Image (cartoon, rainbow, N blue to C red):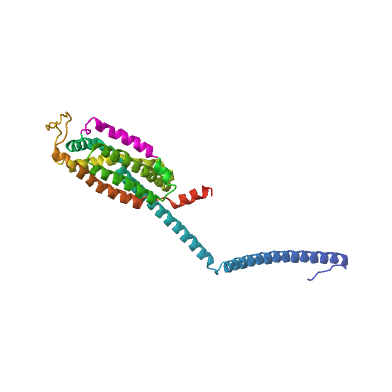
Amino acid sequence: MLIKVRGGDVSSAHKQLGYQVNKAAKGNNQQSNVEEQVNGMEGQYTNHQETEFGTAILRGGGPSSREAARDNDASTESGNDGNKEKSKFRGYLCVIGGMCIHLFCGNQYLWGNIANYVVSYYHYQGDPNATSKISFVVKPISTCATIAFASLGSFLIKRFRIRVLMTAGSIVMLSSVFMASCVKTWWPFVIFYAVLYPMGVGMVYWPAIICSWEWFPERKGLISGLIVGAYGLGAFIFSFVSTAVVNPNNQSPAVPMDGSGTTDKLFSKEVSDRVPTMFRVCLICWAALCFAAICLVSRNPEFVKKEEAKTPE
């Protein structure tokens, strides 16, 4: 740096020289600070990159490990979605199975359609107890038995596997109706049809609904409506089936002129003799419904695990 000195003003030149030196020093210090900051930031960035790289290596991958992690997350999400879809599908099958078993259970109400045929059958079998007046006791007895055994299924579902319970209830119902079609006197028929058959209904009525609730806990009202609706629909459907079998020509009842003295309007012997066949044809359909229910009705495993976790040892 050159400094011009005029007139021997040395002290002024010294001052000017000191000012220039201080200014240059400050500039150098500022530049040094900036360089240190830049170097520090570069060091931090390098350390961050090294840390990420080291973490990736520890996790078992190189630079592509993050992509692999994203792929794993995506596959996990797709797997969860697949499990949810599978669970929902099993829930739909459970509801269908519940509707199938209730289509059979609801045939207690079939009595209103077949009562006169059954009374006519036992009249021609020579049983004086079979009258139109006494036939009205069957439905009240059946209703009382159903109410008495209604809680049986909800009690047994916690102690037996659902498939075992559905099988046992189906066997009780099917065998009771079959025995009712075989007996030749009135009161044994009432016992099998109005007492033992409702006992089987009580074993499967609530388990079918409860299992469906487990699959769709937020739609209990809809599920109950579908299954109980099938309960009422059963008698409607099988009233046509039973009539087609027992009275295909649509004959009308009349007072029999057989010297028995009855004033009840009964069907002819030709029609009433088809009553056992009517029950057995319906039993084939009911057995198919029971088989479908046994295969389709199942409990939700997640709900069972939660229930077992809450149960004290």
Above or below, 28 against 92 in this view is: below
Q: Position of residue 284 (x, y in %)?
A: 25, 49
Dividing the picture into quadrants, the one containing residue 16 is bottom right
Give the magenta part as a residue range: 128-150
Q: Position of residue 142 (x, y in %)?
A: 31, 36
Name the residue located 27 percent from the left edge and 39 percent from the top edge. 188
Q: In the image, is residue 135 part of the stretch drawn in magenta?
A: yes
Above or below, 273 against 140 in this view is: below
Dividing the picture into quadrants, the one containing residue 260 is top left
Frontmost residue, 108 versus 177: 177
Q: In the image, is residue 254 part of the stretch drawn in magenta?
A: no
Q: Position of residue 232 (x, y in %)?
A: 30, 39
Query: Where, quadrant-wise, is the N terminus in this rendering?
Result: bottom right
Main SS, magenta residues: helix
Above or below, 68 against 81 in this view is: below
Direction left: furthest residue = 257
Q: Is residue 68 something one can see in this rendering?
A: yes
In the shown orientation, is residue 56 left or right of residue 243?
right
Q: Position of residue 105 (x, y in %)?
A: 31, 42
Q: Is residue 91 something one can see in this rendering?
A: no
Frontmost residue, 53 versus 141: 141
Above or below, 6 against 299 in this view is: below
Frontmost residue, 270 versus 296: 270
Name the residue located 14 percent from the left edge and 38 percent from the top edge. 269
In the shown orientation, is residue 222 left or right of residue 288?
right
Question: Total of numbered circles in the picture?
Answer: 0
Name the residue located 37 percent from the left edge and 36 percent from the top edge. 147
